[in-house]
Image: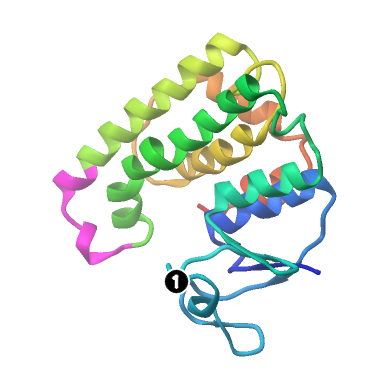
């Protein structure tokens, strides 16, 4: 039985849920906080020493890290449209997924945590403004890539890279701050609106 652990409001859990929608998979989903008990007194830390969600359970396999889970599920279902089998094409998709985790996500931390989560450690306005500048610079990179492809992040076809980056873009749209118009990103998000899971797990009013 395929089981997914983690609250449905989590941006990383929603990546996996959208991927499952694309794959026509319906895992048993048990919600909960990152380190709180989930379901029948199940401790996330007993499954994932990092103490973070999502956690995927597929038989004897226990897997963490949202982008890795998305890749695993696409490969498991042999959906080479979402994650190409050819090494070069797969590497291109994975490179944008890695960029999302290593460059784009850290950029929004200051302003998002300060203005949306209201975390006291991020209340400093200078820190928030620096975060906005960094986040904007990263989003301009994404806009330039989408301008280049004219369609999707990794080229002419929809892939896992679009799922993970659309979730980050939804957070960009939802965070209260000034932001420039990025027409290629706007057109891309509209293009994604017909995808299974987009309205339910991405542009659903949750940052």
- Identify the element where label 1 is drawn: loop
Picture layout, residue 29 above or below residue 94: below
Q: Residue at x 56, y 52 (%)?
A: 66
Camera-nearest residue between 156 and 201 = 156
Q: Residue at x 59, y 68 (%)?
A: 6
Where is residue 12? Give x, y as percent: 54, 54
Is 90 covered by the magenta stretch?
Answer: no
Residue 50 located left or right of residue 26: left
The answer to whether any part of residue 162 appears in the image is: yes
Q: Residue at x 56, y 46 (%)?
A: 67
The colour mode here is rainbow
The answer to whether any part of residue 204 appears in the image is: no
Where is residue 183? Give x, y as percent: 52, 18
Where is residue 201? Give x, y as percent: 66, 51
Q: Which residues are magenta?
A: 118-128
- Residue 30: quarter of image: bottom right
Where is residue 85? Give x, y as percent: 72, 28
Q: Residue furthest right?
A: 24
Q: Quadrant of the N terminus?
A: bottom right
* Residue matched to label 1: 49
Number of on-image labels = 1
Mark 1 crowdedness (10 Å alpha carbons): few <14, some 14-19, many ≥20: few
| Prevailing SS of the magenta stretch | helix
Picture layout, residue 148 above or below residue 20: above
Q: Residue at x 37, y 61 (%)?
A: 117
Camera-nearest residue between 42 and 118 = 42
- Residue 3: quarter of image: bottom right
Residue 66 located left or right of residue 49: right
């Amino acid at each position: 039985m395929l089981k997914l652990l983690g609250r449905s409001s989590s941006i990383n859990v929603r990546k996996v849920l959208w991927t499952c929608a694309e794959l026509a998979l319906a895992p048993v989903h048990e919600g909960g906080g990152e380190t709180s008990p989930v379901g029948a007194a199940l401790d996330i830390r007993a499954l994932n020493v990092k103490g973070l969600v999502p956690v995927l359970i597929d038989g004897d396999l226990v897997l963490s890290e949202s982008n890795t889970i998305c890749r695993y599920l696409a490969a498991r279902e042999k959906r080479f449209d979402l994650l190409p089998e050819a090494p070069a094409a797969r590497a291109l998709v994975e490179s944008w997924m890695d960029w999302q985790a290593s460059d784009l996500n850290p950029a929004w931390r200051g302003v998002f945590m300060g203005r949306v989560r209201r975390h006291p450690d991020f209340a400093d306005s200078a820190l928030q403004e620096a975060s906005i500048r960094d986040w904007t610079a990263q989003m301009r990179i994404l806009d330039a890539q989408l301008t280049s492809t004219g369609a999707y992040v990794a080229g002419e076809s929809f892939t896992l890279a679009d799922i993970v980056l659309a979730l980050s873009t939804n957070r960009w749209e939802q965070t209260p701050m000034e932001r420039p118009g990025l027409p290629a990103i706007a057109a891309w998000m509209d293009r994604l609106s017909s995808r299974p899971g987009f309205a339910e797990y991405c542009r659903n009013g949750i940052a």
